[in-house]
Amino acid sequence: MHRRSFLAGAGALWLPSMARAQAPLAAEPFGLGVASGHPSATGIVLWTRLLAEDPSAPLTGAIAVRWTIAEDEALQKVVRSGEAIADARWAHSLHVEVEGLQPNRPYWYRFVAQGKASPIGRTRTAPDPRERVPALRFALASCQQYEQGYFSAQRHMAAEELNAVLFVGDYIYDISWGRELVRHHDGGRPTMLYEFRNRYALYKSDRDLQAAHAAHPWIVTWDDHEVTDDYTGDISPADSDPVRFLAQRAAAYQAFWEHMPLPNAMQPRGPSLGLYGRYRFGDLAELHVLDDRQYRSHHACRATLTRGKLLTDCDERLDPARTMLGAEQEAWFGDGMRRASARWNLVVQQTLMAEADRGQDGQHSYWADGWDGYPAARRRLLDAVAASPVRDTLVLGGDVHSFWAADLERDKAIVATEFIGGSITSQGPAEARVKALLSRNPHLRYGRTGVNGYGLVTLDPRSAQIAFRTVHSVKEKNSPIDTLARFAVEPGRPGVQRA
Ligand code: FE
Ligand code: CA
């Protein structure tokens, strides 16, 4: 056990490595901010990571950190407090699992290490599963390439009234790319643990991102750039040696866990990290958060791939053995859909699920890395959605750096409604491509590129609404925000409606 948290007065700590000499903490040891996440009705995970005075000489050994969570912003009405151990094994990150909280209410928290206090973060528990909840609100965000823009959208997200932020991947980028960069990565493509840690530290040094973490609990999944562009399971397009790539995946997964408000049960074991999970928000919503990267089959029809991404159709694409979630997660998802009982099912995942045929002149052409590369797996997922006693399912995603609203069809019948919440900064596809997709795929009801921001999902018993929120420009700091478009879904009637 590398870190433990104790309730106040729970007794003496046994700390085998505490006696060792320690490098000095930074003047601002909480310079990466604080965060919370993985909310339940009675618990929350509190996160931070200690920084060393000299970034080139990482902290060593174990450091005790005091944590406090209270009912008020001034931390006067303390409900739990304790001591947790930040250890070098996990980059002196902390994942404090607080339990025994009241459902559906805000809390404030803070850490103190060697007399230095962190900023105060705010968080919120989920409503009790039996509670009748009048309304819920989530932000849907993804894809924040650091070089391509400032994170103003995160600053605006911090100011929204939310139950949680849903971040669906590309939290960091392994690669440098894009036009008109406003700032730069401080290293090349990471493959080693210390390089991934440095990349997270760079991203998390951003004050706007810190503000969004300090304002709301986050529920997270990942996409590809947390490891390497377009990887599939244990195969990387950038490294043909699977043993070396799995070592890189292990490093990337470890750094991801170290920097996210995830529970200790999700601590990675080598190149494996069990990230998918369910979150219940009263009687109104159940979130089914998927991991479609770690277990998926390799890209189909590699011989026909254009620029490694686009495939003309081939038999292998349709192979029913191809999987996006892996057998275990797929069974788990089907089970969750069968037993679902909240008003709304939310499938929170990485990428566009609706078919997006890019073919011309009677030919079919698909993006190999999205659900279109795995149509049998998508069909099985939609079968499970259609079989759920909960008739109203929203699929929420990211990855494509543009805003989309789509009807998800199975045998020509709409079974769910999909929304893609744009990208925080990452640049999107050309406008002509989006227009072509819209004209060839009538179930894609709306698509917009060239703008950045997030989605704001509001649920109540009578409707689901989404607003696409976009900043004026990611190239300017403190860019203002507007609502680009609004859509709604009525219960019992899946499909996109203009609102
Ligand atoms: Fe992305
Ligand atoms: Ca991606």
Image (cartoon, helix red, strand yellow):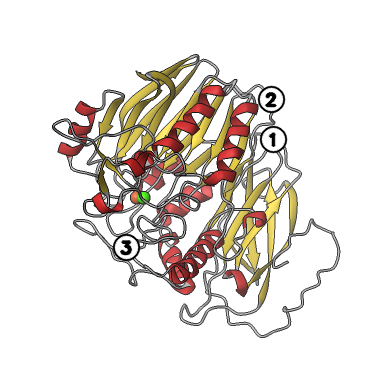
Q: Is residue 81 left or right of residue 133?
A: right
- Count neighbours of disc 2 (C-alpha within 10 A) and say few if under 14, some if 14 to 19, many if 20 or more: few
Residue 30 spot, x, y in % from top left: 54, 65
- Residue that badge 1 annotates: 103
- Count neighbours of disc 3 (C-alpha within 10 A) and say few if under 14, some if 14 to 19, many if 20 or more: some
- The first of marks 2 and 3 along the sequence is 2
- The first of marks 2 and 1 along the sequence is 1
Q: Nearer the viewer, residue 279 or 320?
A: 320
From the viewer's perspective, is the residue at label 2 or at label 3 nearer? 3
Residue 107 shows in this picture? yes
Instruction: Give me the C-alpha separation between circle 2 and circle 1.
Output: 9 Å
- Marks 2/1 in contact by CB < 8 Å: the verdict is yes
- Marks 1/3 in contact by CB < 8 Å: the verdict is no
Q: Which of 158 and 467 is in front in this view?
A: 467
Residue 205 spot, x, y in % from top left: 43, 62
SS state under label 2: loop
Instruction: Give me the C-alpha separation between circle 2 and circle 3.
Output: 45 Å
Q: Quadrant of the N terminus?
A: bottom right
- Marks 2/3 in contact by CB < 8 Å: the verdict is no
Q: In this view, does 230 lie to the left or right of 294?
A: left
- The first of marks 1 and 3 along the sequence is 1
SS state under label 1: loop
- The three-letter code of the residue at mark 2 reads Glu
Residue 487, relative to residue 483: is it above or below?
A: above
- Residue that badge 3 annotates: 175
- The three-letter code of the residue at mark 3 reads Ile
From the viewer's perspective, is the residue at label 1 or at label 3 nearer? 3
Residue 481 shows in this picture? no
Quadrant of the rendered image containing residue 496: top left
- Residue that badge 2 annotates: 131
